[in-house]
Image (cartoon, rainbow, N blue to C red):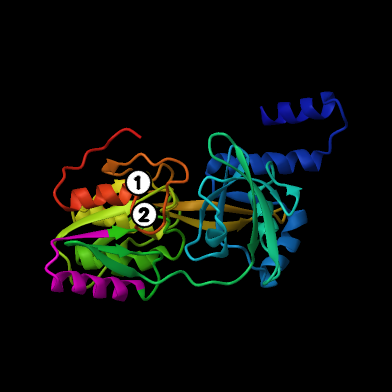
């Protein structure tokens, strides 16, 4: 079928076609059909792409993917210039610095967003059901994600975890100690907008709620990967509610699923990204490079975390522009989480 379509296109298309262009388009389409995060870099472009990556080019802090050939924002990274500039999950990227990227390969979109540190990138995005056009000018600067923070809403401790890194578990441990000191019976762990980072760093944080044991298991056709194991004592045995949304991805999904399966945590909010994956770059004989997903993580009970994402126990309908990344009044996901932390019965509601 591929040969037939290739031959018919070359013979009958209204204009003369270039075989190399057709083939590269086919390779790009195949990677696009795999999942939103896989992509192909052709041999003719690979050297320039690698040179840009090695030059120290800096991006604005956006996780991008492609679905149906269209690039979109999965989420801005916590604390990034993109988050501060108002980039939102699901923004459809139309142009970067005035150049159309709507039908561009994923690697081209990533390359366009990156540039010299201190420069700015201009993005035109379509947002919301009415395809509202929004222009954003974002600095390209290095940044650190915010630290773990905690507060109390009456008798409930609310712990915000923006990222999973080496010091995250210690910060969560300290927040849980404060909760015990105030005799709190319930804690809320907020991982909305928490995306990216090293999945392995989710294990020591999860262990505080689960104790030692399996946190997630990788599934692969060819790679032999060890399960993600946690060690250390369980320090929290009270009720746990996890807040998550459409921008919760990677390590945060592994963390949430492990607590759900092994610590009876209740998940509240929206379905997560589905980005708990392992990717590798494979160089082709022609000199191109295919960056593809070679393994996916499943929860301790076997729930797949890649692709469709982790569905919440209690789904909360959130309208556009009603997605705060920090707890505050008027936050429907937090409000529902507090109700469940104080005894309301969770139930998966239609969104």
Q: Residues within 10 Å of mark 2 (few under 14, many from 20)?
A: many
Residue at which label 1 appears: 310
Q: Would residue 175 be counted in the magenta stretch?
A: yes
314 to the left or right of 164: left
Residue farthest toward the right in the current orientation of the protein: 16
Residue 224 visible in image: no
Compared to residue 44, the image places residue 313 above or below, namely above
Q: Residues within 10 Å of mark 1 (few under 14, many from 20)?
A: many
Q: Which residues are magenta?
A: 168-188
Mark 2–mark 1 CB contact (< 8 Å) = yes
Q: Along the line of sight, which residue is nearer the eye, 272 or 285?
A: 272
Q: How many marks?
A: 2
Residue at which label 2 appears: 253
Quadrant of the rendering where the N terminus is positioned = top right
Image location of residue 252, percent across then percent down: 37, 58
Q: Which of the 4 quarters of the picture holds residue 309?
A: top left
9 to the left or right of 80: right
Disc 2 is placed on an element classified as helix
Image location of residue 270, percent across then percent down: 36, 44
């Amino acid at each position: 079928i591929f040969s037939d379509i290739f031959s018919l296109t070359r013979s009958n298309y209204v204009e003369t076609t270039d075989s190399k262009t057709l083939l590269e388009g086919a390779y790009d389409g195949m990677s696009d059909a795999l999942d939103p995060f896989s992509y192909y870099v052709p041999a003719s472009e690979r050297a320039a792409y690698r040179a840009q990556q090695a030059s120290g080019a800096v991006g604005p802090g956006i996780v991008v993917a492609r679905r149906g050939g269209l690039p979109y924002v999965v989420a801005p990274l916590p604390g990034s210039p993109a988050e501060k500039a108002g980039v939102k999950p699901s923004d459809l990227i139309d142009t970067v610095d005035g150049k159309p990227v709507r039908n561009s390969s994923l690697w081209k979109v990533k390359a366009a967003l990156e540039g010299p540190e201190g420069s700015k990138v201009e993005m035109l995005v379509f947002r919301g059901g009415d395809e509202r056009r929004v222009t954003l000018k974002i600095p390209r600067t290095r940044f650190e994600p915010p630290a773990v923070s905690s507060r109390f809403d009456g008798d409930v401790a609310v712990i915000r975890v923006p990222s999973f890194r080496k010091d995250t578990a210690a910060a969560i441990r300290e927040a849980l100690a404060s909760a015990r000191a105030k005799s709190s019976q319930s804690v809320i762990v907020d991982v909305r907008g928490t995306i990216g980072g090293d999945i392995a760093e989710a294990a020591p944080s999860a262990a505080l709620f689960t104790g030692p044991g399996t946190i997630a298991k990788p599934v692969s056709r060819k790679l032999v990967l060890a399960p993600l194991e946690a060690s250390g004592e369980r320090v929290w045995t009270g009720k746990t509610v996890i807040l998550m949304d459409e921008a919760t991805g990677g390590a945060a999904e592994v963390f949430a699923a492990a607590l759900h399966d092994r610590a009876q945590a209740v998940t509240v909010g929206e379905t997560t990204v589905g980005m708990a994956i392992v990717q590798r770059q494979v160089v082709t004989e022609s000199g191109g490079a295919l960056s593809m997903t070679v393994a996916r993580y499943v929860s301790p009970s076997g729930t797949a975390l890649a692709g469709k994402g982790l569905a919440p126990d209690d789904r909360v309908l959130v309208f556009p522009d009603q997605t705060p990344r920090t707890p505050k009044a008027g936050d429907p996901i937090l409000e529902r989480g507090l109700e469940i932390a104080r005894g309301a019965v969770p139930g998966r509601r239609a969104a």
